Each structure stands twice: as C-alpha cells, then as structure tokens.
Amino acid sequence: MSDEKTLIERLRERTESGWVNAELQALIREAAAELEDWEHAFEMYWKANRRATDIYNAAHPGTEGTLPDQGKMIDWLCDELAKAGDVRARERALARKMRELGDKTQAMADLMRGAASVLEHDK
C-alpha cells in the first residue's frame, strides 16, 4: 500500500497548519467532509455491486470472473427477490393453515375426549 496521503488528509493538514485563511479553511473542511461522504457512498456501492455480481455469476455458469451487464443483473436480482417474496408469502400462508388445522385438531381431540367421557359415564 502506498505511503502517500489521501486528498482528505492533505487538505486537513493544510487547513490545520494555518496555510490558508479562515474562510478558505472552512470551505476546505466542508469540501473534505463532502468528499468523505462521497467516498463512503462509493465504497458501499462497490461492495454491494461485488456481492450482487458474485450472486449473479454463481447462478449463471460460465460467467465466473466477469462483470455482468448492470441492467440485466439488476433485473435478474429483482426477479429473484420477487420469487423469494412469493416463497415467504406461501410459507406464511402454510403456517397460518397449519395453525388453523392445529386449532381444529385440538377442538376435535377435546370433542372426542368429551364423548369418551360420556361413554365411560354411561357404562
């Protein structure tokens, strides 16, 4: 890794050393903060894009090590997300049905215990 200082570091040094007047120092600080925000945003974008590329390439054999068309990749990822949402919705519906069935099963078991109790009592 290079020992050279980043632009932000150089701007801060110049600002703190009194090399420029106060008004210019304020502008430099503001520019350095904005640059830091942009660098952070780009870093987040780059990491997300690499993750998306890895997922896309894993699902498309023969594309390993390549950068897919961004539009195609985003469209595919949106389709995959929609499918995952559909699966989750079906899982929730199934769980709801299972709870309903469990409630009905419990009611039937209670009814049968009640009937058995009546039959035992009638003996």
Image (spheres, rainbow, N blue to C red):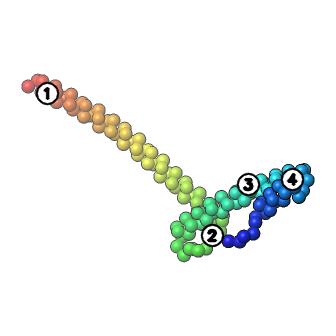
Q: Nearer the viewer, mark 3 or mark 1?
A: 3
Q: Nearer the viewer, mark 4 or mark 1?
A: 4
Q: Nearer the viewer, mark 2 or mark 1?
A: 2
Distance between the alpha carbons at the discs numbered 3 and 1:
78 Å
Q: Residues within 10 Å of mark 1 (few under 14, many from 20)?
A: few
Q: Tag 2's secondary structure?
A: loop
* Badge number at residue 25: 4
Task: Identify the residue at the far top of this view.
Answer: 122
Q: Residues within 10 Å of mark 4 (few under 14, many from 20)?
A: some
Coordinates of residue 75 in the picture (x, y in percent): 62, 61
Q: Which residue is mark 3?
A: 37
Q: Quadrant of the N terminus?
A: bottom right
Q: Nearer the viewer, mark 4 or mark 3?
A: 4
Coordinates of residue 35 in the picture (x, y in percent): 77, 57
Please indicate whether residue 67 sits to the left or right of residue 10 in the image.
left
Q: Identify the mark nearer the N-term, 2 or 4.
A: 4
Could you say which quadrant of the image residue 49 lies in? bottom right
Q: Quadrant of the C terminus?
A: top left
Please indicate whether residue 33 sits to the left or right of residue 60 in the image.
right
Distance between the alpha carbons at the discs numbered 2 and 1:
72 Å
Viewer-proximal residue, 114 or 50?
50
Q: Identify the mark nearer the N-term, 2 or 1.
A: 2
Distance between the alpha carbons at the discs numbered 2 and 3:
27 Å
Q: Tag 3's secondary structure?
A: helix
Q: Residues within 10 Å of mark 2 (few under 14, many from 20)?
A: some
Q: Which residue is mark 2?
A: 68
Q: Nearer the viewer, mark 2 or mark 3?
A: 3
Callout 2 amino acid: Pro
Task: Identify the residue at the far left of this view.
Answer: 123
> Residue at 16% across / 30% down in the picture?
116
